[in-house]
Amino acid sequence: MKSNRGSMLMAMAIACVMPSRAPAQSFETFDVVSIKPNTSGEQGGTNRAQPGRLVGINVTVLRLIGMAYRPIQEFEGGPDWIRTERFDIEGKADGTPNQQQMQTMLRALLADRFHLVARIEQRQRPIYELTLARRDRRLGPQLRASKAECAGGPGTCGVRMLDGALSSQGITMSRLAAELSFVGRPVVDRSELPGAFEVDLKWTPDTATAGAPVDGLPSIFTAMQEQLGLRLEPAMGPVDVLVIEGAQRPAANWASRLPFDVCPLPLNRHRLSRRFIPHCQPSLAR
């Protein structure tokens, strides 16, 4: 009896000192979001995704959709303005969500603030395969293995995309393939290059399919070979297509009326009191 009692006391002592395992954190929406129209008139935009933070400067809604639904590169339907009108957007969440969770939160943001409705279909389409241009597998001078801290982590180093220029301190080949969708076909990574790379690519804009080089810069196809040591090979293959059934502009200037230029998402309404955030009332009431 004494032995059993001693065993029970020992088990209780062990249970008291054993650290409790915290439940896995669930990430479904950003805690705060800022969206403002960008009227700078510039054509290029930048986006950066880090654990718990998403920033897009001068980006179209279609680009946000592309980020949320990677690796899909083919989009159909939707109003014209999602391809032309530009926004500055920032989303923040506590904790360190991974890339897949960040995409989930961005999809929720698009559905809530832009009322995005879409479905995925698969079709046979012309594509480009991203392959190595040289048989010896030597890379071009503007493609180098990345040493940046963000490379390979739960977030990304971000991509800077301007009219005729693409750069990143740490980008995977699958991500690069997704960023090249402007060439007129979806691009599928067949390079078999692992890890992240520094990229600094420049080409003549608006010559993805035809046209003469401008200002001494080559077409995107030639630039890929000369600068990166990569090639875009025409092919046919199954392609996931995102069919956009509908989208709406966010409420005009709603973010700029609030302190710190942020507004809580409706899904987090239980954390706030309306009397402290009157400008959010119409949004929260949806």
Image (cartoon, rainbow, N blue to C red):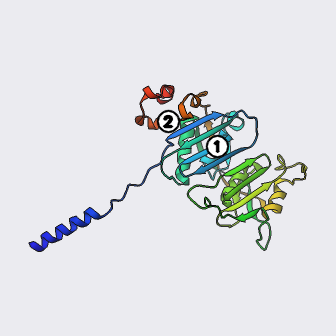
Q: Return the x and y of residue 101 as percentages of the image width and height.
A: 52, 51
Disc 2 is placed on an element classified as: strand
Disc 1 is placed on an element classified as: strand
Spatial distance from mark 2 to mark 1, Cα to Cα? 18 Å
* Neighbours of disc 1 within 10 Å: few (<14), some (14-19), many (20+): many
Residue at point 65% right, 67% down? 194
Q: Residue furthest front?
A: 259
Q: Return the x and y of residue 183 as percentages of the image width and height.
A: 77, 50
Instruction: Compare residues 144 and 75 and report the one nearer the observer.
Output: 144
* Neighbours of disc 2 within 10 Å: few (<14), some (14-19), many (20+): many
- The answer to whether residue 121 of the structure is visible from this angle is no
Residue at point 80% right, 69% down? 134
Q: Considering only order in the chain, which callout, 1 or 2, is on the residue closer to the N terminus?
A: 1
Q: In this figure, which residue is indicated by the disc labeled 1?
A: 56
Q: Amino acid at mark 2?
A: Pro
Q: In this figure, which residue is indicated by the disc labeled 2?
A: 264
Q: Return the x and y of residue 218 as percentages of the image width and height.
A: 87, 54
Q: Return the x and y of residue 29 as percentages of the image width and height.
A: 50, 43
Q: Is residue 76 above or below residue 148?
A: above
The answer to whether the residues at label 2 and label 1 have Cβ atoms under 8 Å apart is: no
